Image (spheres, rainbow, N blue to C red):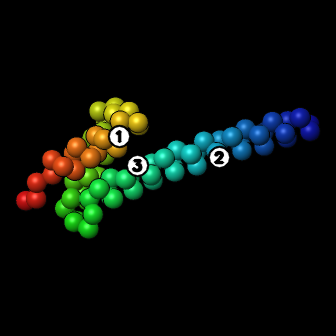
Amino acid sequence: MDLVIVIVVSVLAIALHVVLYLLFRRWMDRDLALSLAGDDEDKRRYMLDCLQRAKDDGVRRRELPAWLEREAARYAPR
């Protein structure tokens, strides 16, 4: 019985760490996109759309900062 408790608690702890890791990574990506947008609300929406497009297109995580910077440079205010 003790072994079952240890295994269950260990699995739950690992699952919690995985969830927190994924949440922090998503928040960091969102923060990067918003920091490139500055205070312009239209550019903020554009950058969040670009971030979603990058995820949909499968842009690698290490390539994401450069990809977002290129998209921020291509932004043309309406």
Q: Nearer the viewer, mark 3 or mark 2?
A: 3
* Disc 2 packing (10 Å; few <14; some 14–19; many ≥20): few
SS class of the residue under badge 2?
Answer: helix
Q: Quadrant of residue 40?
A: bottom left
Residue 49 seen: no
- Viewer-proximal residue among 66 and 13: 66
Which of the two discs, 1 and 3, labels the residue nearer the N terminus? 3
Numbered badge on residue 64:
1
Q: What residue lies at 26% left-to-right and 52% top-to-bottom?
A: 47
Residue at the far left in the pictured view: 78
* Disc 3 packing (10 Å; few <14; some 14–19; many ≥20): some
Q: Which residue is mark 3?
A: 29
- Viewer-proximal residue among 37 and 13: 37
- Quarter in which the C terminus is drawn: bottom left
Residue type at numbered disc 2:
Leu
Which of the two discs, 2 and 1, labels the residue nearer the N terminus? 2
Real-space CA distance between mark 2 and mark 1, rounded to the nearest whole angstrom: 26 Å
Rendered position, 75 above or below 66? below
